[in-house]
Image: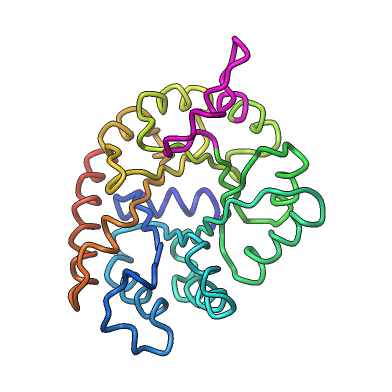
Amino acid sequence: MTRDQLIDNIFSKKSYLCVGLDADLSKIPTHLLDSPDPVFEFNKQIIDATKDLCVAYKPNTAFYEALGAKGWETLKKTADYIGDKHLRIADAKRGDIGNTAERYAEAFFNQMAYDALTVAPYMGEDSVKPFLNTKGKWIILLAHTSNPGSSDFQLFSDGKKNLYEEVVTKSQQWASPDQMMFVVGATRADRIGHIRKLSPKNFFLVPGVGAQGGSLEEVSKEAITSECGLLVNSSRAIIYASSGKDFAEAARTEALKVKKEMERWL
């Protein structure tokens, strides 16, 4: 999915919602456990219930990798089921150099047809560039994350810049905003406006709204642009809105609440 296609999708739906498919086998409704592939059946019903309300889906690959070969199969089936009308983000946080990075890109972009991949920048430019060689695909670089431990390194300063600021500014030399987004946590709303000034054209993938306590209003106020420039992710608050047989309907209800709030910013 190109940048223009993503923007068109956002404004036609009046939504910049990304639904996180963090499907935990221990948390999905028990009536699905008799299915041949319970996690895929869970994802399928969530997607069917929310596809008109969101523009992206983001499976966190850890929940699938933990299931072994079956999980990898489910991850691919999920991408295929989502289709090309939504941005498909593999939240894998990969980061390595040379042919190892190329193989990661091959796995997620070609073998499993994901459109975007989260990438850790710690090893520098040569660990990021191989992910940029696949035409029409995105990388989403970790910049300033929402977890408590993010301050251990991301706020480390040389007296001029924090590390996250250096990541955002330097990495813009490696790729255009047509290929690169940044992960910016919603719980860091006090800094998201500053990061927007450093990267006025890049899309931000913003986790942390919902169960983690981030504010959609604060994020939108600080970082939305004329092209939107935001994908706000919500996972647990939507997909686990109910543990009963009505889980898909409950997920839709929660996704609709978020979407309605987004409409006033577009």
The front one of 1 and 32 is: 32
Quadrant housing the C terminus: top left
Residue 114 among those drawn in magenta: no
Task: Name the side, left or right, on which 262 lies relative to 66.
Answer: left
Residue in the image at 35% along x and 71% along y? 26
Residue 189 horizontal/vertical position (percent): 35, 29
The front one of 51 and 90 is: 90
Residue in the image at 41% along x and 62% along y? 22
| Most distant residue in the right direction | 99
Residue in the image at 52% along x and 36% along y? 202
118 is higher (above) or lower (below) than 141: below
Task: Name the side, left or right, on which 4 lies relative to 254.
Answer: right
| Most distant residue in the top direction | 159
Residue 81 horizontal/vertical position (percent): 45, 76
Residue 170 horizontal/vertical position (percent): 66, 27
Residue 153 among those drawn in magenta: yes
**Residue 209 position by quadrant:** top left
Residue 142 horizontal/vertical position (percent): 55, 40
| Number of on-image labels | 0
Residue in the image at 56% along x and 59% along y? 115
State the scheme by which the image is colored.
Answer: rainbow
Task: Name the side, left or right, on which 213 lies relative to 128.
Answer: left
Quadrant housing the N terminus: bottom right
The front one of 155 and 193 is: 155
Q: Which residues are magenta?
A: 143-167
190 is higher (above) or lower (below) than 109: above
